[in-house]
Image (cartoon, rainbow, N blue to C red):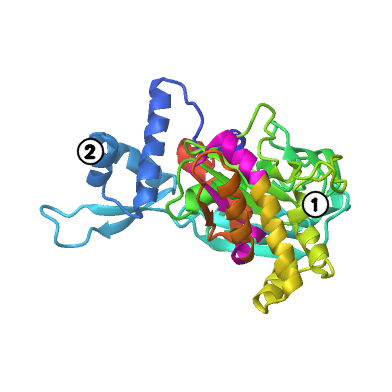
Amino acid sequence: MTAPLHESRSAGSGRALPDTQQGMRRRNLARVMHAVSAEGSLSRAAIASRIGLTRASVSTLVEELIRTGLLEELGPERPGRVGRPGSALAVSGHGPAGIGAEVGVGHLAVCAVDLRGEIRARAVRRRSNRGRPAGPVMRELATLVRRVVTEAEREGLWPAGLAVAVPGLVGRDARTVMRAPNLDWTDTDLGPLLPTDIPLTVDNEANFGALAELWLGDDTPGDFLHVSAEIGIGAAIIVGGQLLRGTRGFAGELGHVPVRPDGPPCGCGGRGCLEQFAGEEAVCRAAGLEPGEGLVGLLAQHAEKGDARVRRALRDAGTALGIALTGAVNLLDPESVVLGGALAALSPWLLPSLEAELTDRTAGPACPVSVSRLGSEGPLLGAAHSVVRAVLDDPAVVAGRV
């Protein structure tokens, strides 16, 4: 499963399978899986109609997918259809599962998602990871992974792969954290540090958050800019339903776009970066609140009560976000901007000033801004679903496991 997981970094588009009879069979298995996954349940005849294959070909593919435990029979279709009722098929609730994990500055989280997209197990541990060496953090994360895997296995699932979201730049090898200023990690290969034999892939948390929005969001367009925040601020760009990574894979570092070149120093080495004005800790300082656990909830609570200083801090953060986003919108011309992570919870007080900046500064029509319903869950869900998508994209790889 290692190769499909690595390829899951390209927005679940699947690997380029060879144009051979075996490659065609694998592509058709994926087409069947995606068709059933998209509809919830389908008969063999309905699958054949949707993907343009003969019923005989579909029946052969379906039998293989049932045999490997990826599809299951639900029984006859509902009455009322003309002709002999077919047997409805659904993606199995047992078998492979995606294990997603998130390393946050203030928490660790792990979840297991089955092929139907349902969360079957999860574990969260709150603690500061700022300045902690990667080794102890990974050992602690591995403990949570084992707990989640054990719980998932009790429900008939097994881990198809482990995807880890981190708040930093990740190398093309999908394992090495090149730089994570808010964790103080540089050039750190997480593979040897994570004591688990589950195939591993690592990616930036904003990338996984954007993929979650693409796959799970409500009516999300194919082109959008996704912005999320914790201590830092990250962004990811989806173009034509694909994640835009850039030459080195580092695209989307919105938090380190300078909004005031003469502003305070940033952990990245620059000055006046967006994070220094709109990151959680920066907003708390401006609001006169002590940084600590549950910053977002604390800010929202004070803002709801009408705290003038907190509301002013959030308004100023929205202005800084709007300035940074204007450059991205003018350059990329996305269909929309989506606020996720902590920004989603604080959107009632951020949006007015953010949208005002976009309206005043954008060269073309103002870009619409929406709020993600996934909120802070986006990166974790995106990580787990990237593994699920890898299985759906190439289900033939599961045959070696069963």
242 sits left or right of 85 in the view:
right
Q: Amino acid at mark 1?
A: Gln
The vertical placement of 149 against 36, above or below, is: below
Residue 178 at x, y percent in the picture: 79, 36
Q: Which residues are magenta?
A: 324-348
Whether residues under marks 2 and 1 lie with C-beta atoms below 8 angstroms apart, the answer is: no
52 sits left or right of 311 in the view:
left
Residue 142 visible to an observer of this rendering: no
Q: How far apart are the two marked residues, 2 and 1, measured between alpha carbons?
A: 59 Å
Q: Which residue is mark 1?
A: 276
Mark 2 neighbour class, 10 Å CA radius: few under 14, some 14 to 19, many 20 or more: some
Q: Secondary structure at mark 2?
A: helix
Q: Which residue is mark 2?
A: 55
Front residue of 265/260: it is 260
Q: Residue furthest left?
A: 83
Which residue occupies 23% across, 40% down? 49
Q: Residue furthest front?
A: 360
Quarter where residue 363 is shown: top right
Residue 167 in magenta? no
Residue 166 at x, y percent in the picture: 72, 47
